[in-house]
Image (cartoon, rainbow, N blue to C red):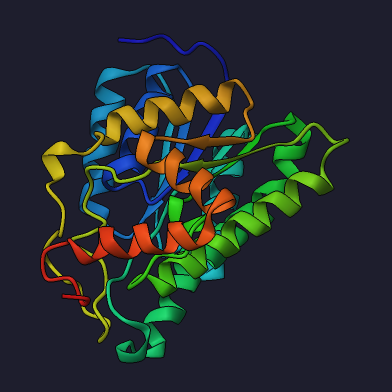
Amino acid sequence: MTSTSSNKVALITGASSGIGRSLALKAAIKGYNVGVIARNKQALEALKNEVIDSYNINFHYHIGDVSKEEDCRAFINGCIDKFGRIDFLFNNAGISMRGIFADTDLNVIKQLMNVNFWGSVYCTKYALPELLKTQGSVVGVSSIAGFKGLPARTGYSASKFAMQGFLESLRNENLKTGLHVLIACPGYTESNIRKTALNPEGKAQGETPLNEEKLMSADDVAESIWNATLKRRLYLILTAQGKAAVWINKLFPKLADKLTYNVIKKEPNSPFQ
């Protein structure tokens, strides 16, 4: 049993699995009160039971869809009613896609923008007044795809570019307020996001093109994100491949195009084969 080290509060979106779930557990380990939102009630109940049984903290969950403004407002307001403050907001909820743009239904692009971009905007908007009071942290769990547009990931890259532009602007607006903004780009992580990624018709592809066992674990990624948050860093880019992709794209953009194309082409069932 871990005793509560403070009354600080961490909110995490998309906490039913993967990085979001790990972020919530690590918040509880650190003694922070935890608020989460996701669509999967059973998964959040299991998370609640694990947290309450093991850690001496307060826990609040909201069943909701971050692509809906009213769900985000209800989540944030419920956490304020429960805890009375917000210190950390992790905008983690996200979905991916896989398919060539020419073949992709536009509703797929809209869905990715609604979840990945608008979900972050909605939650940040309603949490911001409390975060300004505590001089807290807004964290966007983005991707290397937010720095480099990836082939067969047009909607995903667009949503992450938009998220990062929003967060960078928010950071600059608040240079004098004490608000901290972190953009975290994990790189390929062992998670469910690729199995639930949308195909060109908007259906879950149901399989991953990668060997998940060779990727970073969600726990390792969450620990790195928490460390960067507490150090109030501006950016976190994980994995050597991710760092190389960002720098090569800055210095040699044509080479970066060829390299990213070849990486995607080698994936099983790649649309470029």
Asked if residue 143 shows in the view, the reply is no
**In the image, what residue occupies the spot 82% across and 42% down?**
174
Front-lying residue, 182 or 54: 182
Residue 19 percent coordinates (x, y): 33, 41
Q: Quadrant location of residue 100?
A: bottom left
- On screen, residue 260 above or below 56: below
Looking at the image, residue 22 sits to the left or right of residue 163; the answer is left
**In the image, what residue occupies the spot 36% across and 10% down?**
2
- On screen, residue 128 above or below 5: below
Asked if residue 44 shows in the view, the reply is yes
**In the image, what residue occupies the spot 24% across and 78% down?**
199
Residue 192 percent coordinates (x, y): 21, 53
Residue 224 percent coordinates (x, y): 42, 26
Front-lying residue, 72 or 226: 226
Looking at the image, residue 58 sits to the left or right of residue 209; the answer is right
Position of the C terminus by quadrant: bottom left
Looking at the image, residue 147 sits to the left or right of residue 154; the answer is right
Residue 186 percent coordinates (x, y): 40, 41
Position of the N terminus by quadrant: top left
- On screen, residue 159 above or below 23: below
**In the image, what residue occupies the spot 12% across and 39% down?**
213
Front-lying residue, 74 or 130: 130
Question: Going by the picture, which residue comes out furthest to the right?
Answer: 176
Total marks placed: 0
Looking at the image, residue 170 sits to the left or right of residue 176; the answer is left
